[in-house]
Amino acid sequence: MNLSHAYRRSLLTLVLTVVAVGASAQTQTAPPFVPQSGQPGKDVIWVPTPQPLVDKMLDLANVTPQDYVIDLASGDGRTVITAAKRGATALGIEFNPDMVALSQRNAAEQGVSNKATFAKADLFETDFSKATVITMFLLPSINMQLRPKILAMKPGTRVVSNAFDMEDWHPDETAEIPDCQQWCKTLFWVVPAKVEGTWRLPQGVLTLTQSFQMLSGTLGSGNSAVQIVNGRLLGDQITFDAGNTRYTGRVNGDTMQGTFTSGGSKSEWRASRTR
């Protein structure tokens, strides 16, 4: 046999084998993405919320099938999926496309893809104003950047955070899970109606000063004015005391109405904002 010819044939066979192996390796499926606690993200590192705290957060927000839940920086999708299992429509906003794909797989595996969806998006550029419940596990500085946008949402929107607050907007309620080592606390707010200003009641002029859900002010004018105490909002629900009278009601834009109790008797009241 011609050795030179045999050598060339062997070399060609080797080259073809290497090419085939390389092509085969390229067509093999890449290993599935597995997130790592502490991995960097666009605005925060990713740390998973323990499932018991996810459950507590949704309990605190009283999530029902009538809710539209949006989770900001939704990570592996567990909060969105848990909300969907409660019957809610839920959306996760997540910047990392690998996390979005993982969340979609997780939702499919748990049979809630029809209720749990995920979007690759920047939470600072996303319109989440249609949510009835906002969930989040973000740094305090991020919470504060989002706070004006949250406060502009519809009164009554519920907001629940893992661990971190919103500074002088104090939570309406807090809760902790037992037997917990880390990430044990959740904070809950209800977006308050905007009531600061002057209102006209049959009982006189109501002047309100508002600090988030807390209210102060006066009812009446001149020497007959009485101080407002125990003034508070829970979404569009308003309560305050003026003298010996307890007022409760609901706010609807520039009108309020409800009942007041004085001396054991109950009557209706209505107010309109004048400025």
Image (cartoon, rainbow, N blue to C red):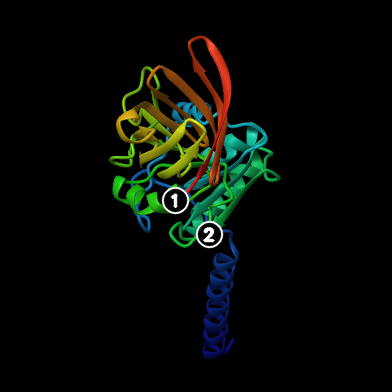
Task: From the top left corner, tell me how far across and down residue 111 is, in percent.
Answer: 69, 39
Residue most toward the top? 264
Task: From the top left corner, tell me how far across and down residue 38 is, in percent.
Answer: 33, 46
Q: Is residue 156 above or below residue 45?
A: above
Relative depth, front residue between 102 and 229? 229
Task: From the top left corner, tell me how far across and down residue 222 is, in percent.
Answer: 31, 35
- Give the mark nearest the N terminus, 1 or 2: 2
Q: On the rendered image, what quadrant is the N terminus found in?
A: bottom right
Q: Is residue 26 left or right of residue 226?
A: right
When asked about the image quadrant of residue 208, the answer is top left
Relative depth, front residue between 209 and 68? 209
Report the residue marked by disc 2.
120
Report the residue marked by disc 1.
275
Asked if residue 257 can be seen in this view, the reply is yes
Q: Is residue 220 left or right of residue 13?
A: left
Relative depth, front residue between 41 and 5? 41
What residue is rendered at 59% in x and 72% in y?
20
Q: Is residue 195 left or right of residue 90?
A: left
